[in-house]
Amino acid sequence: NFAERSEEQVSGAKVIAQALKTQDVEYIFGIVGIPVTEIAIAAQQLGIKYIGMRNEQAACYAASAIGYLTGRPGVCLVVSGPGLIHALGGMANANMNCWPLLVIGGSSERNQETMGAFQEFPQVEACRLYTKFSARPSSIEAIPFVIEKAVRSSIYGRPGACYVDIPADFVNLQVNVNSIKYMERCMSPPISMAETSAVCTAASVIRNAKQPLLIIGKGAAYAHAEESIKKLVEQYKLPFLPTPMGKGVVPDNHPCCVGAARSRALQFADVIVLFGARLNWILHFGLPPRYQPDVKFIQVDICAEELGNNVKPAVTLLGNINAVTKQLLEELDKTPWQYPPESKWWKTLREKMKSNEAASKELASKKSLPMNYYTVFYHVQEQLPRDCFVVSEGANTMDIGRTVLQNYRPRHRLDAGTFGTMGVGLGFAIAAAMVAKDRSPGQRVICVEGDSAFGFSGMEVETICRYNLPIILLIVNNNGIYQGFDTDTWKEMLKFRGATAVVPPMCLLPNSHYEQVMTAFGGKGYFVQTPEELQKSLRQSLADTTKPSLINIMIEPQATRKAQDFHWLTRSNM
Ligand code: ADP
Ligand code: MG
C-alpha cells in the first residue's frame, strides 16, 4: 500500500546500479574494496555482469574495449586514490582511441575532505585531462542524471572516456525510493550527414583521380560502415589500405586491399579518402616524404576539429562515416564510372605487393632454429579461424604479426592503438571473450603478445582462468624488449661481469617458462621451439573450447623485421 511504499529506503549503491542498468550497461570490470564493493554486488543483483580483475589498469582497458566492440560504454569500477590512479592509463588510452568508456570511482567521504581522508585525492580534477566529462553528483538524487550524461557524452560526437565520482558516504546512505527518478536509456547517437555540395566535390575529385587510395581507419570500424565501404570499394574498384584496427572492415584478402604495398600506396597516391583515420604518427602526418606534396585528401570524420590537422584537405566531409559513404555512393552512382582495374597504378601496387609478399614468405620458409617472427606468424595464420578476434601487442610481435595475420571481420582486431600502449592485451582479450561468449558462442580470441608486453598484465591469466574464458595466448618470446640474449650469451655475461653484472635494459630473463603462469591456474600451457610443436599445440588449443591455453613460443632473440623503405616514425627530411 501507498503509506508503506513511501517509506521504502534505497541505498546509494543500489541507485548507482539501477542507473547503470537503465542505461543498458552490460559489463563492469573492476576491483572491489572500500567504498565500492556494495556497488558491484548491487549491479550483479540486477544482472549486470561484473568481472573482477587483478589491476585497475587492465580492468579499464577491458571496459574500453567493450565500448569499441558494442558501441555502448563498458564500466570500470575502482576504489578511491590509487585505484583511480591505476585506471588513468585505461582512460587515456580510451580517449586517445576515441572509444566510449565510463569509469566510476569511489572517493573519500565528503565530510573528511581536505582532512587527509583515507585515499583522498582530487579525482574529478585528475580525470579531466583524460576524459570528455568528469563530474561528481551533488546528491544521491542526482546520480541517475549524471550517469545518463556520462553515458551520453561517451558515445555522442567523437566517442571517449567519462568519469563519475562517488563519495564513500553516498554508497550506504539510504534515501526514500520515491525521491529517485531514473533517466530513460539515452538514445543511440544521432546520425549526421555531410553537406551536399561537399559530397559532389568529393565525388568529382575521386572520379578525376589518377592514383586513388581509400584509407579505412578504426573510426570506420566503430561506425559499422563495413557494408557501405565495401560497396564503394567493389563498385568502383578502388584500392584500399586499412589502418591497424581498420583491418577487417573490408576483409584483408579482398583483391582491392593493398596492405602489402602500404608504403608505396601512401607515397604515390594523388587522391586519398580518409574514412575515420587521423593524420597522426600512424599515418606519418600526411606529409612528404611519405606522401606526395600535392596529394589531395578527402577527410571523412565525425569530429570537426579533426578536419585540417597537419594538411589542408581538398574536401572535408563532416558526419557519420556510414551515412557519408552512402551519400558518396549515391553521388558517384549518378554517372557510370569505374576506376580502370588495368591502370598503371593498379599494376604498380600489384607488383609491389607481390614482391613484399614473396620477401615475407621467404623469411617464413627459413628452417633454421630458433624460429624467426615470419615463420611463427605464417604457421599461426594457417590455423586461425576466420571469425576469431585477434588481440596483439608488443613491438616487433605486433608490427610483423599485423602484416601476416589476416582479419576478415570488422572490429575483430584490438591492439596498442593510437597511444601505442603496451599492457592492453589481456584486458582486451578478456573483453572480447566476454562479448564472444554472450553474442556468438564458439568464436575464439587469439591474443598474440610479445614477452615484454605480456609482463604488463600477466596476472590477468588468473582472471581468464577464474571466468574460464577459452582465450589462446601466444607469447612470441625473444627474451627481451625489441631484442634479447640467448641463454649462452646471458650466462657469459654473468660469468664475465660476475655478481655485479649490469643487466642491459632491453634484456629479460632468457628461457622464461611463461606457460607455467597458465598451468598455475589450471589452464593448458605449451613450451614450443619448433614449427611442428607450434602447429600441434595450436591445433590442440583450438580444439579445446573449454579451457584457456598459453603457448610460449621461443624465437631467435635477435630476430627483426625485414628491410623497410622508411625508418619508423620518419616525419620528413627537414
Ligand atoms: P586509426 O588509428 O585507425 O587511424 P583514428 O583513431 O586515428 O583511426 O581515427 C578515428 C577517427 O574516426 C577519429 O578522428 C574519430 O573522430 C572518427 N570517428 C569515430 N566514430 C566515427 C563515426 N561514427 N563517424 C565518423 N567518424 C568517426
Ligand atoms: Mg620480446
Image (cartoon, helix red, strand yellow):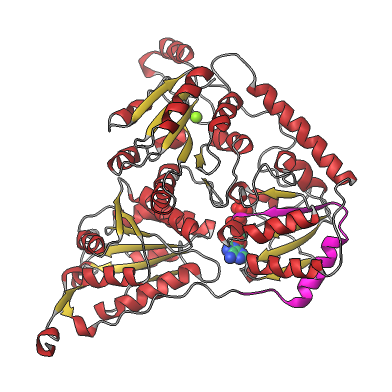
**Which residue occupies the foreground of this view, 338 or 412?**
338
As for residue 526 lying within the magenta part, the answer is no
**Which residue is most to the left?**
4
Is 294 located above or below residue 530 in the figure?
below
Instruction: Give the x, y percent position of residue 372.
Output: 58, 22
| Residue displayed at 56% across by 19% down | 371
Relative side of 107 to 260, left or right: left
Q: How many labels does the image show?
A: 0
Residue 566 falls in image quadrant: top right
Q: Name the residue nearer the viewer: 375 or 387.
A: 387
Side (left or right) of 208 relative to 185: right
Which residue does the image show at 33% across and 30% down from the upper left?
517
Whether residue 502 appears in this view of the structure is no
Above or below 556: residue 418 = below
**Residue 195 belongs to the span the image colors magenta:** yes
Q: Where is residue 390 in the image (x, y as percent from the top left)?
A: 51, 42
Q: What stretch is highlighted in magenta?
A: 192-218
Where residue 573 appears, x then y in whole percent? 77, 44
Q: Where is residue 283 in the image (x, y as percent from the top left)?
A: 68, 50
Q: Is 356 on the left-hand or right-hand side of 74?
A: right
Q: Which quadrant of the figure has residue 459? A: top left
Q: Is residue 441 visible?
A: yes
User: Residue at the spot x=31%, y=72% of the render?
Assistant: 19
On-image quarter of the N terminus: bottom left
Query: Does residue 570 sit above or below 127 in this rendering?
Result: above
Quadrant assignment, res 502: top left
- As drawn, the residue found furthest toward the bottom would be 3
